Image (cartoon, rainbow, N blue to C red):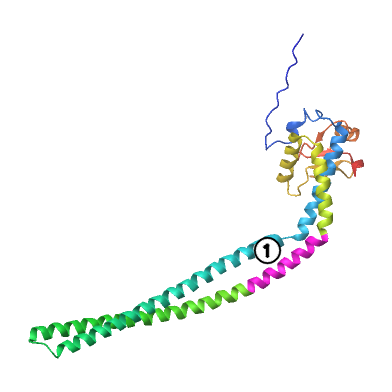
């Protein structure tokens, strides 16, 4: 008894086109006519979904950009607040240094009254002078920190104003987008259900070619009907008479020799 030869499945290439699948297009549970009609219905659903997405325009992207900008501004606001706290802590530390310097100066001045010789007197005066210099440095640090706090607070106010403005913009954009989505949600849901139903009937290789052609075309049309009786509905180049006969028969997959789209019978519309 002869052994049945097992059919070898060729791996699907994401760059597949309708030209590359012409030989095994008819190898399906669906007839060629049904498969062409299903592909055309799939294209019609995708085109309608594209129109809905176009209606939303740049709104989804604008909403995302505003959300990212607000997040960045809030992060900057947090960092500025932290810097202000750090400067305040720096001021507090220097105030403590000033108090310690004053205590040391008072202690050395009290010791001067009881010195036994000039050498000890000079040493104490030197310590008083050093503590005075340290006090001046601390005061300078405090003054500089206060200036930085003033600048950072002004910067923080500007950032907070931007956050408030961008938040209002985001709210308006979201409301506008929600209105459009609400008005088209039922239609989009039905279209996506139709699309899934069509896609479920088509083999993976054909779907891969369909998706590849759609992505490579500006108008996202992978399956088109004959336009004006003798032209491709995608690129509008003239179709040869014999090919028009083949298209009308619904028995072959005919691909436009110019743009690579599947050409289907206008009666499908």
Q: Is residue 237 visible?
A: no
Which secondary structure is most common in the magenta stretch? helix
Q: Which residues are magenta?
A: 165-183
52 or 117, nearer to the observer = 117
- Give the quarter of the figure containing the C terminus: top right
Across and down, in percent, residue 196 comes to 80, 44
Image quarter of the N terminus: top right
Q: Is residue 136 above or below residue 247?
A: below
Residue 142 seen by the camera = yes
Residue at the spot 74% in from the left edge and 13% down from the top edge: 3
Residue wearing tag 1: 63
- At numbered mark 1, what does the secondary structure look like: helix, strand or loop? helix
Check the image and name the residue furthest to the right: 267
Residue 186: x, y in percent? Answer: 84, 56
Q: State the residue lying farthest toward the bottom.
A: 113
Q: Note whether 146 is above or below 20 in the view shown.
A: below
User: Which quarter of the picture shows residue 18?
Assistant: top right
Up-down: is 28 above or below 190? above
Quarter holding residue 56 = bottom right
**Residue ID at (83%, 42%):** 197
Specify whether 173 is left or right of 129: right
- Residue 84 located left or right of residue 196: left
State how many labels appear.
1
Q: Residue furthest left?
A: 117
Q: Where is residue 198, by image quadrant?
A: top right
In the image, residue 182 lies in the stretch drawn in magenta: yes
- Residue 170 is one of the magenta-drawn residues: yes
Q: In the rendering, at what x and y percent does residue 65 appear?
A: 63, 63
Identify the residue shown where x is 75% and y is 67%.
Answer: 176
Relative vertical location of residue 181 with respect to residue 159 in this rendering, above or below = above
């Amino acid at each position: 008894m002869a052994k049945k030869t097992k059919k070898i499945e060729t791996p699907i290439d994401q760059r597949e086109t309708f030209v590359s699948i012409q030989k095994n297009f008819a190898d399906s549970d669906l007839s060629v006519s049904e498969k062409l009609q299903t592909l055309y219905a799939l294209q019609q659903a995708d085109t309608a979904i594209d129109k809905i997405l176009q209606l939303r325009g740049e709104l989804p992207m604008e909403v995302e950009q505003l959300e990212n900008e607000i997040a960045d501004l809030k992060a900057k606001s947090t960092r500025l607040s932290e810097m202000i706290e750090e400067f305040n802590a720096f001021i507090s530390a220097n105030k403590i240094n000033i108090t310690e310097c004053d205590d040391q100066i008072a202690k050395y001045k009290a010791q001067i009254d009881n010195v036994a010789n000039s050498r000890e007197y000079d040493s104490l005066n030197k310590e008083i002078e050093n503590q005075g210099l340290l006090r001046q440095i601390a005061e300078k640090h405090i003054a500089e920190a206060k200036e930085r706090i003033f600048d950072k607070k002004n910067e923080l106010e500007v950032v907070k104003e931007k956050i408030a403005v961008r938040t209002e913009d985001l709210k308006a954009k979201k409301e506008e987008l929600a209105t459009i989505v609400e008005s088209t949600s039922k239609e989009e849901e039905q279209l996506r259900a139709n699309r899934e139903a069509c896609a479920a009937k088509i083999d993976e290789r054909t779907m891969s070619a369909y998706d590849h052609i759609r992505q490579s075309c500006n108008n996202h049309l992978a399956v088109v009907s004959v336009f004006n009786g003798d032209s491709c509905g995608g690129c509008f180049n003239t179709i040869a008479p014999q090919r028009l006969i083949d298209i009308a028969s619904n028995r072959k997959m005919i691909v436009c020799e110019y743009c690579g789209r599947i050409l289907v019978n206008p009666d499908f519309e």
